[in-house]
Every structure is written in structure tokens, then in C-alpha cells.
Image (cartoon, helix red, strand yellow):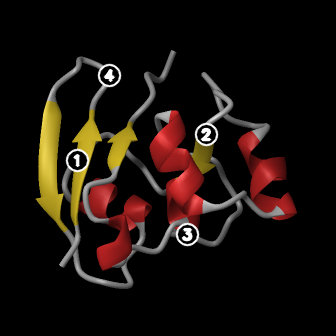
């Protein structure tokens, strides 16, 4: 089972063990990390926006065109931003550090 570290806007770090096949959005939402996931992962909102350091971002691959379009609706967008609903977890992503952006 992959272990993911979520970093909240206040700098607090939270290691969470996740089941293979779940999304970053599901794990973050269900663990109260400040990720809403309003659309439930259907790629129709941007409430699961997260970002990464450069090394971790490279492990994920590029976002799809649809994801990029939704990211354009996000606040605090960075060059390493992604939508958590589009990232399915497996053991290869264990150790990933996920930054949850501030709402403002």
C-alpha cells in the first residue's frame, strides 16, 4: 500500500496509507486534508487541485487536455499543479509529497 504525504497550507505534514487504485483526491478528501472533490472525480470541477515539487511531478506524467482545461479554473495554479482525481495511486507512487494549496 502506498504511503502519501499531504502538506497542508499551514505546513503540517500528514502521512497517509492508501489503497492501490484510489485517487489522490479520494484519499485527501476522506482524510480531511482540505481537498473537496466536489464532483466526485468526474473531471468537472477543480476542487481537488494539488501541486508537487518538480521531481514528484515528473513521476506523474503530463495532465490530459481535459485536465489542463479544468486546472485553468484553479486558484494558486503552479507549473506542477494537477487535479488529484486524475492521479491513481499504486506502489510506484509511494513516498509522493502532495501540497494542498491555500483557498485564497
- What secondary structure is found at the residue carrying circle 2? strand
Read off the residue under disc 2. Answer: 81
Q: How far apart are marks 2 and 4 (CA)?
A: 15 Å
Check the image and report above or below for 19 versus 14. below
Read off the residue under disc 3. Answer: 41
Viewer-nearest of labels 2 and 4? 2
**N-terminal of the two: label 3 or label 4?**
4
Q: Distance between the residues labelled 1 and 4?
A: 13 Å
Asked if residue 19 shows in the view, the reply is yes
Question: What crowding class fits label 3: few (fewer than 14 Cα within 10 Å), some (14-19), or many (20 or more)?
Answer: some
Residue 98 point in image, percent of width and height: 37, 43
Check the image and report above or below for 7 versus 71. above
Q: Distance between the residues labelled 1 and 2?
A: 16 Å
- What secondary structure is found at the residue carrying circle 4? loop
Residue at horizontal 25 percent and vertical 55 percent from the top: 95
Viewer-nearest of labels 2 and 3? 2
Residue at horizontal 67 percent and vertical 34 percent from the top: 74
**N-terminal of the two: label 2 or label 4?**
4
Check the image and report above or below for 15 versus 27. above
Q: Which mark is residue 5?
A: 1
Residues tagged 1 and 2 counted as in contact (Cβ below 8 A): no
Residues tagged 2 and 4 counted as in contact (Cβ below 8 A): no
- What secondary structure is found at the residue carrying circle 1? strand
Residues tagged 1 and 3 counted as in contact (Cβ below 8 A): no
Q: Distance between the residues labelled 3 and 4?
A: 22 Å
Q: Which mark is residue 16?
A: none
Q: How far apart are marks 1 and 3 (CA)?
A: 20 Å
**N-terminal of the two: label 1 or label 3?**
1
Viewer-nearest of labels 1 and 4? 1
Amino acid at each position: 500500500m502506498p504511503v502519501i504525504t499531504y502538506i497542508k497550507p499551514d505546513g503540517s505534514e500528514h502521512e497517509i496509507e492508501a489503497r492501490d487504485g484510489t485517487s489522490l483526491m479520494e484519499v485527501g478528501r476522506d482524510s480531511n486534508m482540505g481537498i473537496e472533490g466536489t464532483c466526485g472525480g468526474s473531471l468537472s470541477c477543480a476542487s481537488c487541485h494539488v501541486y508537487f515539487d518538480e521531481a514528484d511531478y515528473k513521476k506523474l506524467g503530463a495532465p490530459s487536455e481535459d485536465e489542463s482545461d479544468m486546472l485553468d479554473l484553479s486558484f494558486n495554479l503552479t507549473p506542477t499543479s494537477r487535479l488529484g482525481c486524475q492521479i491513481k495511486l499504486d506502489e510506484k507512487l509511494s513516498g509522493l509529497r502532495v501540497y494542498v494549496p491555500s483557498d485564497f
